[in-house]
Amino acid sequence: MHRQKRQRLKAEPLATARFLPSAAPEQLRVWRWSDLLLLLARCLLLLALIAWLAVTVFPWRGDTVLVDAGVDQAWARQQIDSAGFGAAARVTMAAAMEAAMEADILPWLHSHEHEWRGDARLLIVADGAKVAMPARLPQFAHALTLRIKAPLPKAAVANTEHRIALATTPERAAAWHALFAAFNLAGGATQRYVVADAPDGKTELIVWDLPGSAPPPAWRAPLWWTAPDALPELAAAPSLSVNGLTLKYAATARGRVWASSAWPAQDGDGARAIYETWQLLAHAAPAYPASSQVLDAGRAAMPGAAPAAWLAWLLLALFSLERILTHARRH
């Protein structure tokens, strides 16, 4: 499709051509690449089609562990080793469900199960507050093991220390410390909020209040508080309003991110709204948390493949571009 004919006259060295009979010029075909933009569009269309078929037809994942980022990591490693998944690939649940913060892992796994090979095994290691027990378990085509850490009873967590990592400017540091001092008063003698400059393994909350700078990649926590435009994951994040506080939220590989322009609080009512919202949302657990169990494969056929929507749009765009360039070349 990408060759072009060029006309060349075949010349012969003669003293004179007056007495030679007339003859039509001969044409020679010379191979060369032409219409490079059209060639590029067709190659990209072919690559996109291959990627679409690979996602749709050919699973690529093997044994996988889906790990809750907020669960005790020592306990998680013990569960992974005891289940025989020491060599399996590990995926963070928050990263897997990045598009929908409130989606449970079981429905997400059911809709993405076509990504795993037929002989693959799956393991979910999570806190009981993160995986709800559905009224009817979905039927999976792979063997699925649930290792759920049961939440502590309320009496066992009566005296709790909440560790917070605060990254802010010197001008706003006093307001943040005053806010968490108010939290200490609201929690009484049983709840303590300890503020540090960097997170550790027990940090529950990271406050990133440094406009124009990105947090270190190694920082991890179950919950983040940032400004509305602090992280790229918040660009298309949904929002909600609770206790008069407007929040944008997103589930990322860093942890769950809340963004608002209302913090740090400027008065007592604002501090009370932030405290009540945190207690209401951050510590909410499913009414019936899932329990540790093994779910055998319930069906032989793989679920219907649902490739990424952007691949379909990319195929449509490339096909339209290829048709336009082809039409332009002919005319």
Image (cartoon, helix red, strand yellow):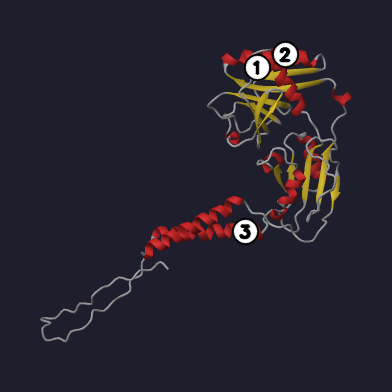
Q: Which mark is residue 153?
A: none
Cα–Cα span, label 1 and label 3? 50 Å
Name the quarter where the C terminus is drawn.
bottom left
Mark 2 residue element: helix
**Quadrant of the rendered structure where residue 225 is?**
top right
Q: Please give the residue where the numbered disc 2 appears in the rendered image.
A: 182
Disc 3 marks a residue whose amino acid type is Ala
**Quadrant of the rendered structure where residue 161 is?**
top right
The image shows residue 48 at horizontal and vertical percentages of 55, 57
Question: What residue is shown at x 16% (from left), y 79% (from top)?
Answer: 13
The answer to whether 251 is drawn above or below residue 26 in the figure is above
Select label 1 or label 3 by which is in front.
1
Structural crowding at the residue carrying mark 2, measured as other residues with C-alpha within 10 Å and reported as few (<14), some (14–19) or many (≥20): some
Q: Please give the residue where the numbered disc 1 appears in the rendered image.
A: 265
| Residue nearest the viewer, comparing 67 with 114 | 114
Q: Is residue 267 left or right of residue 142?
A: left
Cα–Cα span, label 2 and label 3? 55 Å
Structural crowding at the residue carrying mark 3, measured as other residues with C-alpha within 10 Å and reported as few (<14), some (14–19) or many (≥20): some
Tell whether label 1 touches label 2 (CB within 8 Å): yes
Disc 2 marks a residue whose amino acid type is Ala
Whether residue 202 appears in this view of the structure is: yes
The image shows residue 62 at horizontal and vertical percentages of 71, 53
Mark 1 residue element: loop
Q: Please give the residue where the numbered disc 3 appears in the rendered image.
A: 54
